Amino acid sequence: MLEYISTRGNYEKVSASKAIKLGMVPNGGLFVPEKIPEIEMNKLYKPKTGDYRTLALEILNKFLQDFSKSTLNEVINSSYRDNFDIENVVSLKRMGDRTHLLELWHGPTGAFKDIPLQFMPKLLSKSLDNETAILVATSGDTGKAALEGFKNVDDIYIIVFYPEGGVSEIQELQMTTTKGENTASVALEGSFDDCQRGVKEIFSDKEFKSEFHQNFSSANSINWGRLVPQIVYWFFSYLKLTKNEKIEKGEKIDIVVPTGNFGNILSAYYAKEMGLPINKLICASNENNVLTDFIRTGLYDTDRKLKHTISPAMDILISSNLERFLFHVSGNDSNKINSWYSSLEKNNKFTVKSSDKEKMSKIIHGEFATEEETLETISKIYQKRNYLLDPHTAVGVKCFEKYHRKAKNKRTTIIASTAHPFKFAPAVLKALEDGRKKKGLEAMDKLTKLTGWDPHWGLKNLQGKKIRNKYTCSKTGIREIVRKILKN
Ligand SMILES: *Cc1c(COP(=O)(O)O)cnc(C)c1O
């Protein structure tokens, strides 16, 4: 049976269900599969994998081995049928001769995170033996997708922490109006990194956790259960391109991912390691370009000021899942991970050896887009194709253009489209027309009038909804607020 180990070599091997229940390694570190399972592509080229659920079962069964196939099948079917507005969960949109956008936002909250977060709560509830408190740090999109996924799931309470003033009006309304008796949202006076650090500290604070009868877990992409469902759509879209004869079977493609916490791009890396023909992963960043610099130089340096951009889900300096990537790339070397991450904690930076950097560069390429370039890209694509990009996806498109200019061998490319444009209506509107910047709901109306696009169904009627279970706390007040909410 496939087991999961800690990136820092500080924990026993655990089953998939245990890794998901724990969320992260209790003494710090992240769970990774001991060995990445391989899949024979030839076995996937058949009509029935054109059904998302059938394919999901084939892929997920390889990673989640202590769940029975019938349990997985049940969870997959209840996650990926009526909760999405298209039959097969994701959709490819042609953007050019050999460029395709992969729309990942057809779920209930309009962001790609619905795909893992419709699945994971149902999976988790199959393996729970105790009440569980899910703590989530969010820069906006994870929060709502997690609240939607976990609301009214038995024996689970979910608390979401978001940076006060760091998420959009629409995102905040989406979160704070979530129904369900087991949900709470907390505005924290700090950045996303502060939220993430605070939540991670609680996970490794045994004494604090012992105050509660609940177990603690997470719904961020540090949790294996959040990450693994994302592997499926890379296979699905590749197979679709072969079926539509856009590529030959076995032909290598490039994949571009607008990146924040490095979860989505890491899921594409797992797909590649499993055997999906991927040439390069292009890591697209906004002006918070820590990752671009790291991929180019080998120096990971977070000693810089966080910028608030129009692609807030990527306003992150410490990308948690990079740790998993580095672990695999360095040949499962937890000594290296320990030394890099203790340096990161002490000095806010670390450097990898040039041999590690070389290995990394074979797989991944880093680009970033400025705010201006992002706005220009939204406007340009709208003029040219009558298609609206959200700002995160626009960062991806711009980074693709930059990469494409340099690449010697130009390949068919999939660009992840990570959110519906209306989730970030003020920025999209600003790109299309100059003038006074409008706030969320007003911007949505205006955007509809201007373009004829409808808001995503999950974003309609936000205005009249009741605010529920909303709290605030300071950077140091996370423990207190968790007590207040859970012991109530
Ligand atoms: C979360 C998010 C991202 C970043 O994804 P990671 O897995 O954190 O790298 C990009 N775009 C949107 C719209 C998101 O919600």
Image (cartoon, grey):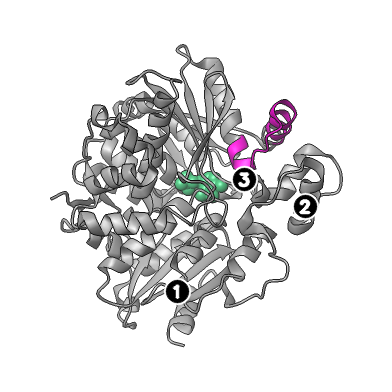
Up the image or down, 466 lies above or below 231; here it is below
Residue 152's disc is 1
Location of mark 3 (residue): 311
Residue neighbourhood size for the residue with mark 3, other residues' Cα within 10 Å, grouped as few (<14), some (14–19), many (≥20): many
Q: Residue, x 45% and y 71% (percent of image)?
A: 158
Tell me the distance, in whole angstroms, between the alpha carbons under discs 1 and 3: 30 Å
Residue 443's disc is 2
Whichever of labels 3 and 2 marks the residue nearer the N terminus, that label is: 3
The magenta-colored residue range is: 375-394
Whichever of labels 2 and 1 marks the residue nearer the N terminus, that label is: 1
Whichever of labels 1 and 3 marks the residue nearer the N terminus, that label is: 1
Residue neighbourhood size for the residue with mark 1, other residues' Cα within 10 Å, grouped as few (<14), some (14–19), many (≥20): some
Amino acid type of the residue tagged 2 in the rendering: Ala
Amino acid type of the residue tagged 3 in the rendering: Ser
**Judging from the image, what secondary structure is the residue with disc 2 in?**
helix
Q: Main secondary structure of the magenta part?
A: helix
- 470 with respect to 280 (left or right): right
Tag nearer the camera, 3 or 2:
2
Would you identify the image quadrant in which residue 461 lies?
A: bottom right
Up the image or down, 342 lies above or below 365; here it is below
Asked whether 197 falls inside the magenta stretch, the response is: no
Q: Residue, x 34% and y 82% (percent of image)?
A: 212
